[in-house]
Image (cartoon, rainbow, N blue to C red):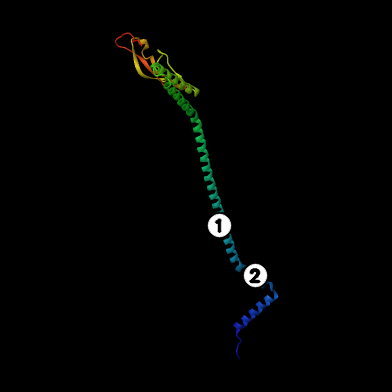
Amino acid sequence: MKRPDLDSTETGSKEVVNDAAIFSNPSSSVVIDEESDSEADSAPNSQDDLSALLSHLEARLLDAFNQKLAFDNFKEKQIDRLHEELQGYKSDLLLKAAQPLIAAMIKLHAGAGRLIIGISQEDPTKLTAERIIGFFDNFRDEIADILAARGVEMFLTAVGEQFDVRRQSSVGTVETSNLALAGRVAETAQPGFELGSTVLSKEKVKIYSATCSGADEPKS
């Protein structure tokens, strides 16, 4: 008599038991199927989320770059505008500063024109050296008036005053036997000009120089 196959019998018994368990508790089969589905769906969802995150970051970086570019363009335009305004202000300031000088030069030009007309209209027989000197002397006074109107004053040092290197420059000497006059102003060759406390042009003077022979002071 043939023996039954024990292995096949055990396997069949296990299958029957499993089927019975599933039949008795059908929810366990559903849970197993749902876990399998969720694991299968999680991979595609993670990839979609990563792709969306990268796209969002790319959009933000692009927006930040565009904002920086727009700001740089705006800043460059502002700098150009400010430069143009400063150049305009500078031109206006230079013009305002030069206007008094321009007006003085125009007035000086007009004075020279009057001098030329005055000399040309004089009778040649009466146009002596003294008359010509008088014309130029008047013209020089007009120039001094123009300077004075701009705050520039002319100054002269009296004969015998002490020589001041800060306000005067020596252009020659005059000999004298009077030792007390040595180093003092003998005569003015050209007046000086000052604006307030600032010397614009030093006075050109001749100063006394003591003689070695002790001769009398030369007469002027």
The image quarter containing residue 54 is bottom right
Of residues 127 and 71, the one nearer the viewer is 127
Of residues 168 and 61, the one nearer the viewer is 168
Q: Which residue lies most toward the right here?
A: 24
Q: Can the viewer see residue 171 in this picture? A: yes
Name the spot of residue 180 as percent of width and height, x first. Answer: 37, 10
Give above or below for 107 relative to 16.
Answer: above
Label 2 is placed on what type of residue? Answer: Glu
Of residues 119 and 63, the one nearer the viewer is 119
The image quarter containing residue 29 is bottom right
Q: Residue at x 61, y 67 (%)?
A: 41
Label 1 is placed on what type of residue? Answer: Glu
Circle 1 crowding by C-alpha within 10 Å: few under 14, some 14–19, many from 20: few
Q: Earlier in the sequence, mark 1 or mark 2?
A: 2
Circle number at residue 15: none
Q: Which residue lies most toward the bottom here?
A: 1
Of residues 174 and 10, the one nearer the viewer is 174
Q: Which residue is mark 2?
A: 34
Side of 34 where 147 appears, left or right: left
Give above or below for 205 relative to 69.
Answer: above
Secondary element at tag 1: helix
CA gap between label 1 and label 2 equals 36 Å
Name the spot of residue 215 as percent of width and height, x first. Answer: 31, 8
Name the spot of residue 18 as percent of width and height, x first. Answer: 65, 77
Q: Residue at x 34, y 14 (%)?
A: 174
Secondary element at tag 2: helix
Side of 147 where 17 appears, left or right: right
Name the spot of residue 49 as percent of width and height, x first. Answer: 59, 61
Give above or below for 188 relative to 76.
Answer: above
